[in-house]
Image: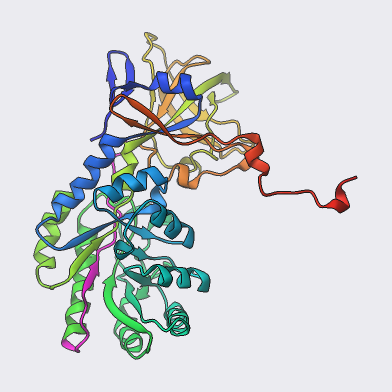
Amino acid sequence: MHDFHYQGEELFCEEVPIRQIAEQLGTPCYIYSHRTLIRHFHAFDQAFQAIPHIVAFAMKSNSNLTVLRILAREGSGADIVSGGELFRALQAGISPNKIVFAGVGKSKEEIRYALESDILMFNVESPGELQQINTVAGAMGLRARVALRINPDIDPQTHPYISTGLKKSKFGIGADQALGEFAAAGKLPHIEVVGVHSHIGSQLTQVTPFVDALKKAIALIQTLQANGVHIQYLNIGGGLGITYSDETPPHPKELAAAIFPLLQTVSCQIIMEPGRSIVGNAGILVTKVLYNKDGANKRFVIVDAAMNDLLRPSLYEAHHDIQPVMKNESSVVNTVDVVGPICESGDFLAKDRKMPQSQPGDLLAVMSAGAYGFTMSSNYNSRPRVPEVLVKGKDIIVIRKRESYEDLVRGESIPEVFSN
């Protein structure tokens, strides 16, 4: 459930008309609902309140400082995948003892920064990474807390680009190798093995893959404990899906009910890493119609937002509902491609979409854009990145300014040899 709704013929975010924000700040722009963020975080936190747990928000989905601060104030931790995300998490006030560091390519510098920051643990993805963490920790005179990420070879039944738990994936350590890698980790002098991590993919709309992966993780923990290895943390990952179109993903309560019987067979603190399911439907991208164009075989609605602003449709052919900010009285419905100004055929927000007739100047809301929207945006075609706006009740708060043309060249310089 989210707080974007029509009052009469006009789309609102909480108590604010979307049109008002567009008039004040221009388009394109991202708009987030404070109320929705809070509600979605508590859906997870309360679903698992019966057991010790940490909700570590997956920052890759949305790393705006204000969004992170809001979640931190509610008690959230962070799932990070880079030194930059660690910096953002700390700037936003997220406690280091609630930060877990995942990702297959952690550099020496990032490992050192994480150890200096005293994060909760690393989610280790390979034997080579484990050796690197041991070396860096040793040079610092520390022991690094780690969980080994196992790859359970479970099909999450999602898009192949966001499926991470199959044997062919680059992520994690094969389940058949796990015992050997845990034994090797236990012999390293600057490593403290504290957890098991399993994450099989994103935008999951069924509980069964979670259950199947968890069974393998728990079987591994029970074997490890029988061999004298004390596992304190079980990281069940994230990936719970949201409704983009007609999906019916489970509520966090349904997930909790399905996996509680399994979780109660081990005495571990549970870590979960939701991202999309907290912020996805808490945000929209607002864009303005520039032109209508009738091609030989297609009708196009050309808007001022593009693939550099929202990459998911071009990258995944992902579906985002598109709604008029102001409903019109036209009974004409066209099948159109909604496209942007970028010089790529892949620059589209929707293809073959049935939509009411729109006119230049009309505002459209690209729904469910709060996750993997701004974080995947770029300056391709030298387009300034768009602002991010938070609505809290009746308040409109700019939480990231629109970039200027000057911002595009900040940090660049023309060497003296080329000055003439």
| Picture layout, residue 82 above or below residue 220 | above
- Residue 60 placement (x, y as % from top left): 41, 53
- Residue 201 placement (x, y as % from top left): 34, 58
Question: Residue 252 in magenta?
Answer: no
Task: Specify the color scheme.
Answer: rainbow
State which quarter of the image contains the C terminus.
Answer: top right
Q: Which of 108 and 397 is in front in this view?
A: 397
Q: In which quarter of the image is residue 295?
A: top right
Q: Nearer the viewer, residue 243 or 260?
A: 260
Q: Quadrant of residue 357?
A: top left
| Picture layout, residue 152 above or below residue 303 | below
- Residue 347 placement (x, y as % from top left): 56, 37
Q: Quadrant of residue 56?
A: bottom left
Main secondary structure of the magenta stretch: loop
Please identify the residue farthest to the top as the structure is shown.
Answer: 329
**Horizontal side of residue 246 vs 297, given as left or right:** left
Tally of numbered tags: 0
Residue 70 seen in this snapshot: yes
Q: What stretch is highlighted in magenta?
A: 226-245
- Residue 231 placement (x, y as % from top left): 21, 78
Question: Residue 237 in magenta?
Answer: yes
At 51% from the left and 16% from the top, the residue drawn is 361
At 46% from the left and 47% from the top, the residue drawn is 375
At 50% from the left and 14% from the top, the residue drawn is 359
**Horizontal side of residue 367 vs 393, given as left or right:** right
State which quarter of the image contains the N terminus.
Answer: top left
Q: Nearer the viewer, residue 380 or 14?
A: 14
Please identify the residue farthest to the right as the structure is shown.
Answer: 420
Residue 246 seen in this snapshot: no
